[in-house]
Image (cartoon, rainbow, N blue to C red):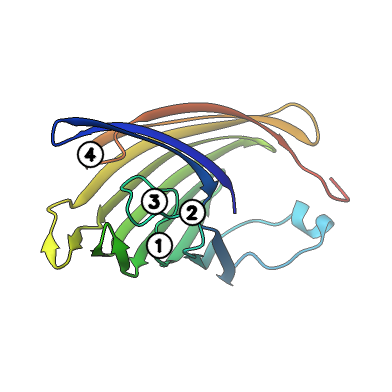
Amino acid sequence: DAEVWISGQAKLNGQPRSRDVAGLADPRFRASINLYGAPATTMSEFTNYQQNVIVGMSFAVTAPLGRYDSDKLLNIGNNRWSFKPELGISKAFGRLTLELMPAVTIYTDNDDFLGQVKEQDPLYSMQAHAIYSFRRGFWGAVSATYYTGGSTTLDGAGQHDLQENFRVGSSLSIPLGKRESIKLYGSAGAWARTGGDYWLAGIAFQYRWGGGL
């Protein structure tokens, strides 16, 4: 769970409206498991491990425990559950690794959305990554994400708000030492029907720990 602060301004029927609110966000729980490939190894065995095909899956659940005010449009919590099963497939070709991750997010109804029942269709998504390892700890990747669906209805009336978006991005991890590295990353919207049309860039410091490194 995380503490969140949001602020927004808009006009409703020609009148300015604003809202500032802080509180806990809906907590998200995620479990994952390898189904094929990627056997458990010791640190010495991992040094000589050569990846081939790996298949895994995860299941994420978001619980409606965040702050929610039923008479407000702008909220931190969503007052509904969501469930996201996801499959992950990875195949190595020498230094190049290709990954594909299809997923679907399923939503329960919000039965108190400004006095109405809000329903949302499943949101389907697909991620693809191509990762190249130059040497240990030094790698680069290009990525793409596509999602579609998520149309909503209010008391059975369609809102004509189908989501559809395609994004591309890249990452570069540069080792600084045996345990430390810097990661540069960025992404941008390539095409958007609605939502998600933005760009971002960032830098992260990474530290690895554990015996045998």
Distance Cα–Cα, label 1 vs label 2? 8 Å
Residue bearing mark 1: 79
Q: Are marks 2 and 3 in contact (CB under 8 Å)?
A: no
Residue lying at the far bottom of the rendered structure:
35
Q: What's the residue type where badge 4 is placed?
A: Ala
Element marked by disc 2: loop
The reply to whether discs 1 and 2 touch (Cβ–Cβ < 8 Å) is no
Query: Residue 108, relative to residue 101: is it above or below?
Result: below
Query: Which quadrant of the rendered structure holds the C terminus?
Result: top right
From the image, tell me which residue sits under label 2: 67
Image location (x, y in percent) of residue 7: 41, 34
Q: Amino acid at mark 2?
A: Arg
Of the two numbered discs 4 and 1 on the same chain, state the one appearing first in sequence. Answer: 1
**As displayed, is residue 198 above or below residue 70?**
above
Q: Residue at x 37, y 60 (%)?
A: 102
Residue 36 seen in the figure: no
The amino acid pointed to by label 1 is: Asn
Q: CA distance from mark 1 to mark 3?
A: 27 Å
Identity of the residue drawn at 31% across and 39% down: 196
CA separation in Å, label 2 and label 3: 30 Å
Q: What residue is disc 4 on?
A: 192
Residue 127 image label: 3
Asked where in the image residue 180 lies, by quadrant, the reply is top right
Of pointers 2 and 4, the one earlier in the residue sequence? 2
How far across and down, in percent of the image, does residue 165 sit?
A: 26, 44
Mark 4 is surrounded, within 10 Å at the Cα level, by few (under 14), some (14 to 19) or many (20 or more) other residues, namely some
Instruction: Check the picture and name the quadrant holding the N terminus.
Output: bottom right
Spatial CA span between label 3 and label 4: 16 Å
Residues packed near mark 1 inside 10 Å, few (<14), some (14 to 19) or many (20 plus): many
* Labelled pair 2, 4 in contact (Cβ < 8 Å): no
Tell me the amino acid under the disc marked 3.
Gln
Q: Is residue 150 left or right of residue 131?
A: left
